[in-house]
Image: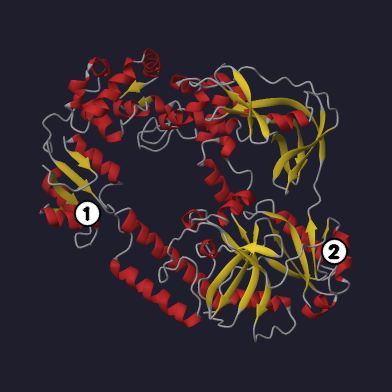
Amino acid sequence: MSYQDKKVYMQELIEKLNEASKAYYAEDREIISNFEYDRMYDELQELEKETGVVLAGSPTMRVGFEAVEELPKERHERPMLSLDKTKDREALAEWLNGKEGLLSWKLDGLTIVLTYREGKLLKAVTRGNGEIGEVITGNARVFKNIPLQISYTGELILRGEAVITYSDFEKMNGEIEDVSARYKNPRNLCSGSVRQLDNRIAAGRNIRFYAFGLVKAEGVDFENSREKEFLFLSEQGFDVVEYHKVTPETILQTIEYYEKKIEHYDIPSDGLVLTYEDISYGESLGMTAKFPRNSIAFKWQDEIRETELLEIEWSPSRTGLINPVAIFQPVELEGTTVSRASVHNISILRALKLGLGDKITVYKANMIIPQIAENLTGSDTLEIPDHCPACGGKTEMRQVADAVSLYCTNPDCAAKKIKSFALLVSRDALNIDGLSEATLEKFIGRGFIHEFADVFHLSRYKDEIVEMEGFGEKSYQNLIAKESAADGKASSIEAARHTTMPRFLYALGIPGIGVANAKMICREFGDDLEEMLKADEERLSEIDGVGEVLADAFVSYFKNEENLRKVRALYEELEIEKREQAEGGNLTGMSFVITGSLTQYENRSAMKEAIEARGGKVTGSVTTKTKCLINNDIASNSSKNKKAKELGIPIVTEIDFISQYMEG
C-alpha cells in the first residue's frame, strides 16, 4: 500500500471511529460492535506508528478546547509579500520564459503559516500585514485536516490557505435566522472563525487547510524542484492545493481545465497561481519593492453581459428584512443562463440608480455569484415599496451598520413565521415533499401563502410558479399532483390532504405539543376536534404526557380567535383518517423504551405506532415505570442497558418482545 493509499485509509478509519463514538456517547446508539471499534482503533494506531503521521480528528489524540483573552502577535520569519497579478492568459505563457511552472488554485480564504518541531505542531500564525500576524495555534489544532503529528522531526515551516467550502458556508449561514446577520461570503466566515478566542467555535466551522508553499525544511534535498516540495508536504499528511505542471505550450489548455472546474468547485477560489518549477531560477530573479518575481497570480477575466432590468422582486425574510432582487432579461454567463441577482440592500440599490427598463451590465463574482456591475441608463426611477408583499403591512427603512435596508413592521407577517410553515409540511406533520424552507420563503414572499390553508391552493399560482427559478412544469406537477402517501413517504400537496388527526394536531405548532403527546390527546378525545376544543386545562392536564403547562398552552392557543379561524380553515382542506381506537389494548398502561437498530420493524417510529395501537406508551428514558427495554444488543454497555440493569428492568430483544407482548 502506497503512502497516499495509507493516508486515505487512515482518514476513512478516523471518520468511522468518530461516527461510532458520537453515536455511542452522544446519541446512545451503537452502530458497530465494541470488538469492531477496537479492531479499527488498533489498525489506525499501527498505521500512525508506521507513517509517523497523526491526521486531524484522530481518536488516538484528542485535542482539548481552550479559550484565550486575546490573540498574541508574532513577526514572521520571512515576510509574506503579495503577488503581482494579471488577467491576460497570453502574458502567463510569456512570463514562463520557456521554463516549466506549477499552476495551482489561488484559494480565497485566510493565509496561515504553520511551524512544526520534533514532528508536532508548534504554532500557527495568520498572514496579518505580511510582516506580523496573529497566533491562532489553538484554533489550527481543530481544523478538519491539519496533521497534529508528522514523520519529519526537523523544523518545518509552510504556508497554506484556511478555507470554508461553499456547501459548509451555505449550511452554516442557513442556520442564522437573522438575514442581516448572515456572512456575506465563505472568506468572511473563515476569517472570523480562524480568529475566534475560543477554539470550540472554530471546531464547529469545518475549516480546512491547503498547503501552497514550503518556507523551510531543515536537511531535506528537494533537488531544486518545487513539485518535490509539494510531494514532501503531501507525504507528511498535508492536503496540498491542486496543481498541474505546465509549459508555455500547455498553460492555456490547463487554464481552460481550471475554468471549467471552478463552475462546480466547492472550495472558494479567486484565480490561479503560477510558480517556477525550478526553485533556484525563481529565487535568482529576486523581487520588486512589492512582489516576488518567482510567482504570479492570474485573476479571472470577468465575463460581462449587457441586459435589461425587468423588475425588482422584494423578498421578505423571517427577520422582517425585505431583500431586493433584480430580475433581468436572461443572459449566458460563464456557461449558464442567469436572470436574477441580489441587490443586497437599499444603499446599493440607490447607488446603482436603478429603474425598470434600464440597460445594465451583469457578471459572476469569482465566476459564481451573479452581480450587477453597472447601470448604463441610470434612470433612478425605482420606487421603494411602502407595503410588504407577503402581508401588506407597512415597511420602513432602517440604518443597519453601514447600509440602509427595508423592513416589514408587521409582527404577524407570514414571512416572519417561516418556521411554523416548515413544521406544517414536515415529515411527522402533513409530510409534503418539495416545500423546503427556501421554497416556502419564496412562495410567502410572493404572497402565494398567508396562512396554513393556502398551501392547498398553490395551484392558483401555477403560471407564476413554473416560471420561477428552480421550478418548471415537472417540478410543479411533482409538488401538486395526487399520489399515494400510505407508505409514509414524503408526498405531494394533494396526497397530503389525507392525513391523521395526530399529524394535524402536531402540524399546528402549539407550544410544547410534540408528536407523542399529540397522539395521546387525540386518543383521549377519539380524534374529535370539537371535543378537544371544549376541553379545559383540568381535563387536559389529566392526560398522560400532557400536564398543567402544556394544557394551558393548548387552551390558550385555541382561545385566540384568529388561531381558531386558521385552524378551521386548514381542517376543511383535509380528509382525516378514521382510526379504530385501541380501547382495552393488551398493552394499556404499559411503558416501553426502544434503543439500538431494529430488524423486524422498518424503524423505531413504526414499532412505536404498533405499541401505541395496542394502548401502550413509548418513552425516551428508562425509569421505574418502564415495563421493559427493547434492545437487540442485550450485552451492550449502553447507558440505557446500564440503567435498566440498575433498576431491575428486563432487557428483551425485538423478537422476544413480539412473542411476549404483540402476539396473541
Colour scheme in use:
secondary structure
Reading the chain from its start, which is encountered first: label 2 or label 1? Answer: 2
Q: Could you tell me the amino acid type at mark 1? A: Lys
Q: Marks 2 and 1: CB-CB under 8 Å?
A: no
Residue at 37% in and 58% down: 22
Residue that mark 2 sits on: 92
The answer, for residue 464, to whether it is visible in the render is yes
220 versus 283 height, above or below:
below
Secondary element type, mark 1: helix
Real-space CA distance between mark 2 and mark 1, rounded to the nearest whole angstrom: 65 Å
Q: Could you tell me the amino acid type at mark 2? A: Leu
52 versus 462 height, above or below:
below
The C terminus, quarter of image: top left
Give the camera-side residue of 659 and 360: 360
Residue 630, image x, y percentages: 19, 51
Residue that mark 1 sits on: 640
Q: Dividing the picture into quarters, in which one does residue 310 lie?
A: top right
